[in-house]
Amino acid sequence: MSQTIADLRPQDDLVEFYFEQPWSDGLPVVAPTPEKVAAMVTALGDDGAYLECRVPPRYGNLTREVLAVNLVMAGCKPVYAPVVRAALLALCDAHFNLNGVQATTHMAAPLLVVNGPVRHEIGMNAGCNVFGSGNRANATIGRAIRLVLLTVGGAIPGDLDKSTLGHPGKYTYCIAENEEASPWAPYHVDRGYAPEQSTVFVIAAEPPHSVTNHIANDPQGILDSIISAMSTFAHNNSVSGGSCAVVIGPEHAATIAQHGWTRNDVRSYLWMNTTNTFDQISFGGRYGKIYNRNLPRWYKREAGARIPIVASPDDIHLFVAGGEAGRFSAFIPGWGHMTSPVLRAVDGQAPSAGGPLCVDGTCRL
């Protein structure tokens, strides 16, 4: 018979107990003592029984108390709690299709990108090793999300999580945009939020694919290297559309911006030039029309036709992040048309009507 919390004795090893649970992420957790859980509930607004959302595929109830327990186990500080809650509410938005992401055989995992003042308020890393280890906020915020997906959503590998391979982002996958090193407006401002608002952006994504270019001194050379990484029929975007992300390193971003290129210019150039032929993605029809059905109706289905990896430049979500030294960027493929990214304010407020009239060099009436 499996041991339960009620069976524990003072001398029992809590670390080992949590390792034995089927929802463990495989790493040691912080014991959720009543005092620590109470502090988290307070950070979430009190009322531990309040239902924040239901998490698929099991559709377990995520109350504030349950969320607090997972926050503590992940090693979060109470000040991180609003960011984790906002991310989970975004993930449970119907447009994201978390049920599909949790249960797919694909390797997709939710990537969280944070914008706005909260990045500094809670000490997030947007610079060197941004996708890597070494920052408590990035690591534990992403881990808390994964623990909720396991414990409340029930996406236990081999059970409801059917991912064939998975990827390391299924431990934690959380970064902040390096707004200070970016030559462009922050991502959330470009999408209508005011600079003083803090937001979370979630997208179902593969791991980052490094793009190296140490020679180009113009936008086209840098972006052509990114296009090389994007132009492959091995990822879901190429055969199923949807959305993807591109993270431009600060050195690359500075070079691009020196020539007057805006974020919209970059997205448009990438979209226009990142294509595969219909022959490539359909294998010349050798295996039937399985790769034809998910493409937009207006795409030509004929030999030699150029097929973009996503339907619109707006489906390429562009961020600036990473250390200021090193001419590297990254392409992050998405899961395909089965999911849509979600952007949400940490406090749940709508985009500010008093935001800037001109963003990224383009004026809005």
Image: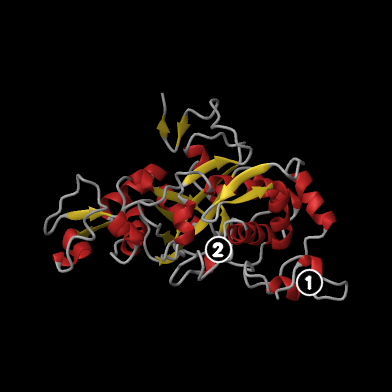
**Rendered image quadrant of residue 246:** bottom left
Residue 161: give x, y in percent of width and height. Answer: 50, 65
Count all numbered tags in the image, as a single digit: 2
Element type where label 1 sits in the image = helix
Q: Earlier in the sequence, mark 1 or mark 2?
A: 1
Residue 313: give x, y in percent of width and height. Answer: 34, 45
Residue at the spot x=30%, y=50% of the render?
271
Q: Local crowd at mark 2 within 10 Å, few (<14), some, or many (≥20)?
A: many
The image's mark for residue 14 is 1
Q: Nearer the viewer, residue 258 or 124?
A: 124
Looking at the figure, which quarter contains the C terminus? top left
Element type where label 2 sits in the image = loop
Asked whether, in this view, residue 183 is left or right of residue 238, the answer is: right
Residue at the spot x=70%, y=53% of the render?
66
Looking at the figure, which quarter contains the N terminus? bottom right
**Visible residue check, residue 99:** yes
Q: Amino acid at mark 2?
A: Phe
Q: Residue furthest right?
A: 10
Q: Is residue 296 above or below residue 232?
A: above
Q: Nearer the viewer, residue 175 or 89?
A: 89
Q: Is residue 253 above or below residue 117?
A: below
The colouring scheme, among rainbow, by chain, secondary structure or one colour, is: secondary structure
Q: Amino acid at mark 1?
A: Leu
**Visible residue check, residue 262:** no
Residue 3: give x, y in percent of width and height. Answer: 74, 72
Residue at the spot x=41%, y=29% of the render?
363
Residue under pointer 2: 131
**Could you give the CA–CA distance between mark 1 and mark 2, rounded to whole angstroms?**
30 Å
